[in-house]
Amino acid sequence: MRIYTRTGDEGTTSLIGGRVSKDHLRVDAYGELDELNSFIGWAAACCQGDAYEELRNQLIEIQHEVFDCGSDVAYAEKKQGEVVYKVHAEQVARLEAWIDEHNAHTEAIRKFILPGGSEAASALHVCRTVCRRAERRLVTLAREETVHQQVMKYVNRLSDYFFVAARRANAIASVPDEEYVRSAEVFRRRSRHDGA
């Protein structure tokens, strides 16, 4: 199979159902999801050893689901009414269950924490921030065109997952989270995660 096609040499690319400029909002949105997926792969590679097996397996499953998100976003607007979407409410619910599980295995926090600690946690914090950027692109796209609502929910919940997964990775490594010293006490322990 030949990798290069030359069809994009004039600055356009294919959506499912049409061609658009490479800087089209829809291309930008699924490009952000592709970047996020690359960072998730890096984070999974940082989760070495038996202690991280559950976390690593979750990250690999999430990679498949982020690819599904990108697929759902990659349909041209005129095709949106015909799409059988890949992302469903059950995937969002499973993310919430994983969030609750990881949160239950970390110390209560009172203040904002700095991204970092162990290598795995640092990589997961990068995933969190890239995920938020991808979400912002999806919100921008949704003002102009159709975006599958379950993708919006999944990506919003996913950044919460990366936050608690980073804290769990630090706990596994016995590395304490570093509190932001000028933070007020803004957090409380929640029995069920209800992030932004």
Image (cartoon, rainbow, N blue to C red):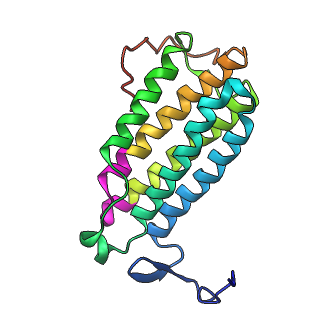
Q: Does residue 19 lie above or below 39 as drawn? A: below
Query: Residue 23 in the image: x percent, y percent?
Result: 52, 73
Side of 183 where 142 appears, left or right: left
Q: Does residue 54 lie above or below 139 as drawn? A: above
Answer yes or no: is residue 13 visible: yes
Q: Name the image quarter holding residue 71.
A: bottom left
Q: Residue at x 57, y 58 (%)?
A: 34
Query: Residue 193 in the image: x percent, y percent?
Result: 39, 23
Q: Is residue 151 magenta?
A: yes
Side of 19 where 7 appears, left or right: right
Q: Residue at x 43, y 11 (%)?
A: 189
Which portion, as a residue range, is magenta? Answer: 141-153
Q: Is residue 70 magenta?
A: no
Side of 25 where 178 appears, left or right: right
**In the displayed image of the protein, which residue is found farthest to the left?**
81
Query: Residue 166 in the image: x percent, y percent?
Result: 61, 28
Q: Residue at x 64, y 87 (%)?
A: 5
Q: Does residue 106 lie above or below 194 as drawn? A: above
